[in-house]
Image (cartoon, rainbow, N blue to C red):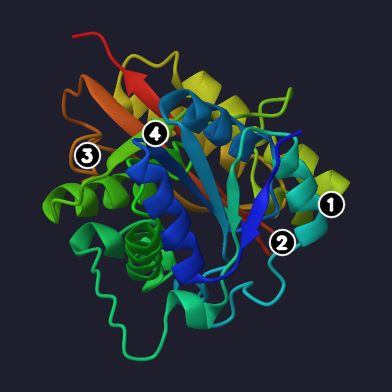
Amino acid sequence: MSSLAVVTTSSGMSDIVAGWKSEGHSVAFVPTMGALHQGHGALIEKASELADRVVVSIFVNPLQFGTGEDFDSYPRDDEADQAFLRARPVDVLFMPTVDEVYPPGVAVTAAAGPVGDTFEGASRPGHFDGVLRVVKRLCAIISPDFALFGRKDAQQLFLVDTMVRNEGLPITIVPVDTVRAPDGLALSSRNAYLSDDERARALAIPVALAEAERATTLSGALSVVRERLESEPGLTIDYVAGVDPETFHQLDEDSPIREATLIVAVSLSTTRLIDNRALHFPQ
C-alpha cells in the first residue's frame, strides 16, 4: 500500500513537484478520467519504472465531451479509485475542479488540426481539441518528465505526441500497450455500460482484429474485419480503416502497404468502443 497524497489545487500540485525536482527526482504523469482499471494499472507500473515519482490525475474533462455525450453519466467512483491507487506505486493523486484546471484569465490553446477532424474527431467534433487542451494544461501544472498514454486510443496518442513535439514541450510521451481482459476485449471505463449480452457481442472486435493479423494485404485485413463486425447483431460500425502510423492519414487499401494501424469504432446500443491493431504485410 502506498502513502497516497490527494491534492486538489493546482498551486499545491506544482509546489510538490517543485520540491521533488529540487531534490533531483524525475516525475512521471498518468492522466485519467477515473473509473480506473488494470489498463490504468499498466500505465502506473510503467511510470514507476521510468521515474522517481508518479502522479496520477483524475479529471473528467468537460471540453472533450460533445452535446449529447456521456459527460454527466461518465463512470465516477472516487472511493474505489483511491483504493485502487493506494495499492499501486503512486505518490500523488491530483483531483482538481474545473476552475482549478481552467481558471478565469488563463487561456489554454491547442488545436488538433486536420487529423483531429477525422475518425473519432469526425464522430465527436471538437473532442481532440478538448483532449489536447487538458493535456497541455495538466502538464503545465505538473511539469512531468514523462507522460504515459495507452495505445488503445491510437488517434489520441498520435495527436498528443504530435502536439508535444511541435510545441517543443520538455516531456517524453510514453505509449503503453493495450491491456485486455482474458477474452480479448480491450479494457475501457465505458465497458461498465455494457450489458452481459452486449459485452459478449463486443468480443467480435478482438476476434476480427486477430483475424486481420493473418491477412497478407491491407485490403484483405479490412475486408475480414468489416465482414466479421457486420455479421454481429446489434453492433453498428462507425469506421474500419487503415492509417499510416507516422501520419495517421487514411491509407489506400488497394495500394501495396508494408505496415498500417487498423482502427475500428463501433457502437453497441449507446456505448461506443474503439480498438486497433498494428499490422505488417509481406512485400
Where disc 3 sits, the SS reads loop
Cβ atoms at labels 2 and 3 below 8 Å apart: no
x 34%, y 53%: residue: 143
Viewer-side label of 4, 2: 4
Viewer-side label of 3, 4: 4
Which of the pair 216/209 is nearer the observer?
A: 209
Residue type at mark 1: give it: Ser
The residue to which callout 1 is attached is 195
- Residue 66 visible: no
Residue type at mark 2: give it: Ser
Quarter of the image for residue 218 reads top left
- Gap in Å between the C-alphas at discs 3 and 4? 23 Å
Where disc 2 sits, the SS reads loop
- Gap in Å between the C-alphas at discs 4 and 2? 30 Å
Viewer-side label of 1, 2: 1
Which of the pair 243/6 is nearer the observer?
A: 6
Where disc 4 sits, the SS reads strand
Of callouts 1 and 3, the N-terminal one: 1
Say the numbered circle drawn on residue 175.
Answer: 4
Quarter of the image for residue 76 reads bottom right
